[in-house]
Image: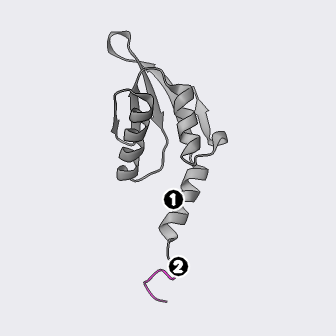
Amino acid sequence: MSSKDPEEGFDDILAELDKEEARIRVRMEMRRFGKPTTVIEGLKMSEKDLQELGTKMKKILATGGTVKDGIIILQGDHRERAVEILVKQGFSESAIEVI
């Protein structure tokens, strides 16, 4: 056996499988001073990909937010639109749970 992976793009295939298998939770949380925030957790992505997705979501939704500890936090209640964006990014709608 060789230590090299015989198939190119193996990591890409695993990333696609993770998207299909992911259990994503989108919920609204009240933060300081009664401000609503949308919290998206359960995304199995690299930190870099998660940052890119967070940036893209903030731009589309025209809102502020942050990405930390594998969680995307958006300012405001964007649950429905966040689900639409995740589906367009290739995540299965059945794997997304809105709370």
Residue that mark 2 sits on: 7
Residue that numbered label 1 is attached to: 15
Which label's residue is closer to the chain start, 1 or 2? 2
In 3D space, how far apart are the residues under numbered discs 1 and 2 (Cα atoms)? 15 Å
Q: Is residue 6 magenta?
A: yes
Q: Position of residue 65 (x, y in %)?
A: 34, 30
Q: Is residue 13 visible?
A: yes
**Magenta region, residue range:** 1-7
- Residue 32: image location, x then y, percent: 32, 14
Position of residue 84 measured from the top left corner of the image (x, y, whole percent): 57, 35
Q: For the stretch drawn in magenta, what is the main secondary structure?
A: loop
Above or below, comparing residue 63 to residue 44 in the picture: above
Residue visible at 39% across and 31% down in the picture: 73
**Residue at image coords 57%, 43%:** 88
- In the depicted structure, whether residue 49 falls above or below residue 58: below
Q: How many marks?
A: 2
